[in-house]
Image: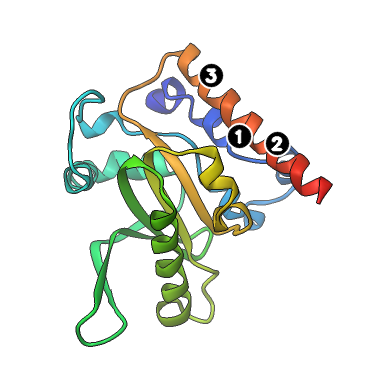
């Protein structure tokens, strides 16, 4: 609880959601929870013990999260169960792909796939996650499961990449930044304001369309 307060857990969650949805959800039960109610931006991973200024590989970030799985699941939020790391999917006898981290959320009743990126988000990253999610929906999830969620955890993301990709209209694909330290209140406010402005801009553009 102390960590969640100091990492501004609630503020980060609310900043990642449409405020009209927040008000509506407040009048509904937990059964009405949607992916947008769970996914945060940014995620704070200070427990991983990695330096913000040091260069490290995606495999090192993955190992740090797995080594601190309890803290990572607290940061992810309610209902997450760990399924595995480097989960292999194959579409023929010789072609294999590996998903960094796979979870199942018993509240959302769906698989949650996480891909880790130490650099800036790219179209290739989004296309890769889109493939993973579609594969899980077609081959892995059961009939009573909800659609699979894909989260790309990245160091940076450009608004133009988010705007002109499937992220803009796919409700089950998300790109969230991660921070390797507990931000100051001023830093977090600035980050949340940027995210709020982005969401409001997207909403106005969709309304104009």
Check disc 2: other Cα within 10 Å, few if <14, some if 14-19, many if 20+: few
Comes first in the chain, label 1 or label 2: 1
Distance between the Cα atoms at labels 1 and 3?
Answer: 14 Å
Which residue extends farthest bottom? Answer: 93
Task: Tell me what residue is drawn at x 58 percent, y 32 percent.
Answer: 195
The type of colouring in the image is rainbow
Residue 152 in the image: state x and y as whole percent: 41, 50
**Residues at circles 1 and 3 in contact by the CB criterion of under 8 Å:** no
Camera-nearest label, 1 or 3? 3
For numbered disc 3, what is the local secondary structure?
Answer: helix
Distance between the Cα atoms at labels 1 and 2?
Answer: 17 Å
Number of marks present in the image shown: 3
**Residue 27 visible in the snapshot:** no
Depth order, front residue of 83/191: 191
Give the residue number, with chain letter if any, for mark 3.
190
Q: Find residue 92 and report its image quarter.
A: bottom left
Q: Does residue 89 appear to the left or right of 209 in the view shown?
A: left
- The label on residue 75 is none
Q: Is residue 27 above or below residue 189?
A: below
Give the residue number, with chain letter if any, for mark 2.
201
Distance between the Cα atoms at labels 2 and 3?
Answer: 17 Å
For numbered disc 2, what is the local secondary structure?
Answer: helix
Q: Is residue 163 above or below residue 189?
A: below
Task: Tell me what residue is drawn at x 45 percent, y 76 percent.
Answer: 141
Task: Tell me what residue is drawn at x 59 percent, y 46 percent.
Answer: 163
Q: Is residue 124 above or below residue 74?
A: below
Query: Which quadrant is home to the N terminus?
Result: top left
**Residues at circles 2 and 3 in contact by the CB criterion of under 8 Å:** no
For numbered disc 1, what is the local secondary structure?
Answer: helix
Q: Is residue 166 above or below residue 12?
A: below
- The label on residue 14 is 1
């Amino acid at each position: 609880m102390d960590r969640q307060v100091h990492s501004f857990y609630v503020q980060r969650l609310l900043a990642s959601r449409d405020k009209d949805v927040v008000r509506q959800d407040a009048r509904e039960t937990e059964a009405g929870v949607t992916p947008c109610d769970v996914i945060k931006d940014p995620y704070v991973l200070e427990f991983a013990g990695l330096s913000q200024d040091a260069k490290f590989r995606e495999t090192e970030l993955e190992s740090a999260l797995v080594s601190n799985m309890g803290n990572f699941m607290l940061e992810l939020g309610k209902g997450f169960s760990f399924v595995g790391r480097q989960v292999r999917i194959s579409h023929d006898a010789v072609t294999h792909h590996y998903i960094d981290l796979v979870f199942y959320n018993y509240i959302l009743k769906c698989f949650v796939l996480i891909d880790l990126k130490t650099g800036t988000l790219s179209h290739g990253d989004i296309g890769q996650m889109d493939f993973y999610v579609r594969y899980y929906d077609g081959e892995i999830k059961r009939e009573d499961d909800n659609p699979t969620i894909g989260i790309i955890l990245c160091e940076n993301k450009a608004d133009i990449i988010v705007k002109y990709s499937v992220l803009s209209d796919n409700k089950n694909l998300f790109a969230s930044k991660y921070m390797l330290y507990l931000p100051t209140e001023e830093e977090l406010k600035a980050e949340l304001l940027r995210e709020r402005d982005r969401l409001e801009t997207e909403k106005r553009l969709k309304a104009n369309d």
